[in-house]
Amino acid sequence: MSDYLIIGGLAAIMAATLVLPFSVKRVEEDLEAFLFVMGMAAVSISGLWSLRLVHEALKDPLPITAAVAAVGFLFREVRGHLRGWMETLTRKLGLPATIFTVVAVLGLGSSVFTAIVSAIILAEVVTILKLSRRFEIRLTVYACYAIGLGAALTPLGEPLSTIVVAKLKGPPHDATFFYLLYQIGAWVVPGVLLCAALAARGAEAAEAGAAGLTEDARDSGADILKRAGKVYLFVMALVFLGAGLSPLAERFMLKMPTWALYWANSVSAILDNATLAAAEITPAMTDRQITFILMGLLISGGMLIPGNIPNIISSAKLGIKSREWASAALLPGALLMLGYFVLMTLLVK
């Protein structure tokens, strides 16, 4: 197959991958299967099939899948104690400090017990609070920003971090388990703490006993296993997709200015950021390019519901509508994007 046909075919796959999940409801509902098919098509067009790639696609999803299942079952056993823990914390620290602590722990802890489980715990916490709906929506939004940022620190946290470490594990980056912590930790941790502080702001003035948000239903064992299975298929699909689209990324992404890569990834507000990471990041990129790409994806991913996994889970469980989410999340997200861009332009070499 000629080079032009390969690039054209990969461009068509990338366009379909970015557009169809947002515009076709059936694709959105079966995103994992859709990405799996697109990934295999991309590898086939690129001519990159190998036993090593198949082995990686089968192996790389295992740690995050196991974490989602194990922590999901663990939380199901202890969730009955959550109300008592929240009451004890509130009595000792006060409501604002309690909210700050919970959001910070969910944000930073999501890198260990996954963004999915953090979002489920968040829904339970918000249900317990019984504050005004407006405040609880804002709290949920900021908490999801914190979770989306913090989960990127290890490959256990979310599919985005899993796929980035998998793609960069060879030379020249030689990414290990703690690669992302070293690469973006100095930017992510302050962001998580800032989001926790913003989530707690105004808590004392929020109307207690109001008709706030309520979790729709608690997860059964079957729900936990089904979610883990979907994560496995999702990450496997991203391994294939990332490998298959690598010729396209190496030809065009490497030539883009770093600032353009950052702002272009604001589309992560409407598109899953793990899919974008799989399509964009290649080992040939510099550390500076990778930092700008990742921070652009992570911040803008919180701006609208489809942007990342914690948004999707929390909004579905708590019944937050797209318009309500956008109203609370767009302005803070835009300010975070601008602030991070200025600071990283000055400080990231």
Image: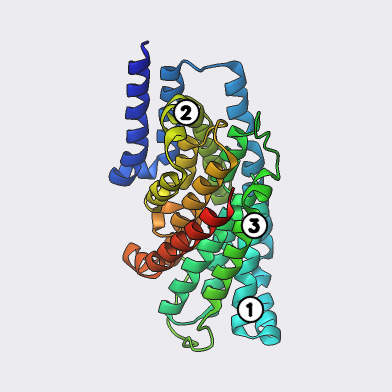
Crowding around mark 2 (Cα neighbors within 10 Å: few <14, some 14 to 19, many 20+) is some
Instruction: Say few, some or many: other residues with alpha carbon within 10 Å of mark 3 (under 14 / 14 to 19 / 20 or more).
Output: few
Residue that carries the numbered disc 3 in the rendered image:
186
Q: Which one is in front in this view, the residue at disc 1 or the one at disc 3?
A: 3
Tell me the residue at 35%/42% (across/down).
21
Q: At 71% from the left edge and 85% from the top edge, which residue is drawn?
A: 92
Q: Position of residue 212 (x, y in %)?
A: 44, 78
- Disc number for residue 187: none
Q: How far from the left and from the top, in percent, is residue 207?
A: 46, 88
Residue 328 lies, with reference to residue 61, above or below; the image says below
Percent of width and height locating residue 108? 65, 60
Q: Earlier in the sequence, mark 2 or mark 3?
A: 3
Residue lying at 63% horizontally and 80% vertically, measured from the top left: 97
Q: Answer few, some or many: residues within 10 Å of disc 1's Cα (few below 14, many 20 plus, some between 14 and 19).
A: many
Please name the amino acid that badge 1 sits on: Thr
Residue that numbered label 2 is attached to: 250
The numbered disc on residue 98 is 1
Q: Which residue occupies the foreground of this view, 248 or 114?
A: 248
Using residue 87 as the reference point, say whether residue 3 is left or right of it: left
Q: Is residue 249 above or below residue 314?
A: above
Asked if disc 1 and disc 3 are in contact, CB closer than 8 Å, the reply is no
**Mark found first going from the N terminus, 1 or 2:** 1
**Residue 219 in view of the camera:** no
**What's the residue type where badge 2 is placed?**
Glu
Secondary structure type for disc 2:
helix
Label 1, secondary structure: give it.
Answer: helix
Residues at marks 1 and 3, CA–CA distance in whole angstroms: 24 Å
